[in-house]
Amino acid sequence: DAGVIQSPRHEVTEMGQEVTLRCKPISGHNSLFWYRQTMMRGLELLIYFNNNVPIDDSGMPEDRFSAKMPNASFSTLKIQPSEPRDSAVYFCASSPTGAREAFFGQGTRLTVV
Amino acid sequence: GDSVTQMEGPVTLSEEAFLTINCTYTATGYPSLFWYVQYPGEGLQLLLKATKADDKGSNKGFEATYRKETTSFHLEKGSVQVSDSAVYFCALGQAGTALIFGKGTTLSVSS
């Protein structure tokens, strides 16, 4: 199994630009999570999908952030416009039906300058 | 709401020392408990889990026992290695919700 695949691994962008992060969950998993990790705040849940439907987006910081899951094998997290305080490592994770553990991708390190 | 509290680091040990990282939780119902490990530049990896009270999870020499009476899930290893240097996260999972993580504990092992 290839595991959760995220792209890109690293992204450097200028303030004000649009950034799109991508995630391919493990095949057959029906839950998908986006987390953000920073030194100050630790690991924060941004949004959680179940069967492609957003279940909990209370962690999305503000309207500049949006997430979609058009099908079971793909999700995006978009930031528009980006700001320096968005600099962080963004993780995608997936989970199979009935399981409580999640399996993480390698993360995308985002730097906004 | 549910929450996880783990000891703050960093924890600095010599090789072959005994490791304990404390984790306590607050939760309603019957959560599952997990330890994840994150090596530098990588994602979180599931290290071990326990799904009910008195269960012991174990993997790679690490152990943790689900103690409902003390609401704890402390991580232990009898003899750490340099390769165990990483950040360790305690987490709680309930049906139909996302995992809740502690803030992480950095372990540094020197030879």
Image (spheres, coloured by chain):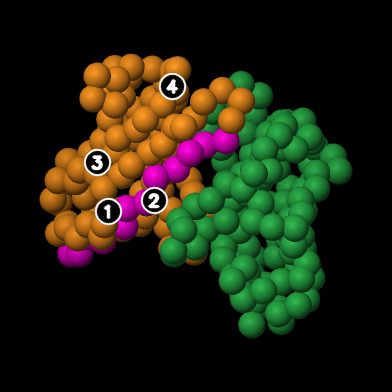
Chain colours: A green, B orange
Dot 1 and dot 2 residues touching (CB under 8 Å): yes
Which residue is situated farthest in the right direction here? A70
Dot 3 and dot 2 residues touching (CB under 8 Å): no
Q: Nearer the viewer, residue B101 or A31?
A: B101
Dot 4 and dot 1 residues touching (CB under 8 Å): no
Q: Mark 3 or mark 4, which is nearer the start of the sequence?
A: 3
Percent of width and height locating residue B57 = 34, 28
Q: Which mark is residue B22?
A: 3
Q: Amino acid at mark 3?
A: Asn
- Label 2 Cα neighbours within 10 Å, binned few <14 / some 14-19 / many ≥20: many
Percent of width and height locating residue A81 = 76, 71
- Label 3 Cα neighbours within 10 Å, binned few <14 / some 14-19 / many ≥20: some
Q: Mark 1 or mark 4, which is nearer the start of the sequence?
A: 1
Q: Is residue B74 above or below residue B43?
A: above
Mark 2 highlights which residue?
B103
- Give me the chain letter of mark 2: B
- As measured in the structure, the alpha-carbon distance from the residue carrying label 1 to the one carrying label 2 is 8 Å
Read off the magenta span: B98-111
- Give me the chain letter of mark 1: B
Quadrant (top left, top right, bottom left, bottom right) of the C terminus of chain A: bottom right
Relative side of B43 to B74, left or right:
right
Which quarter of the picture shows residue B86?
Answer: bottom left
Query: What residue is shown at x 43% (from left), y 53% (from top)?
Result: B38
Percent of width and height locating residue A76 = 77, 53
Q: Secondary structure at mark 1?
A: loop
**Res A107 visible:** no
Relative side of A57 to A53, left or right:
left
Q: Is residue A60 above or below residue B28?
A: below
- Label 4 Cα neighbours within 10 Å, binned few <14 / some 14-19 / many ≥20: few
Q: Mark 2 or mark 3, which is nearer the start of the sequence?
A: 3
Query: What residue is shown at x 26% (from left), y 48% (from top)?
Result: B7
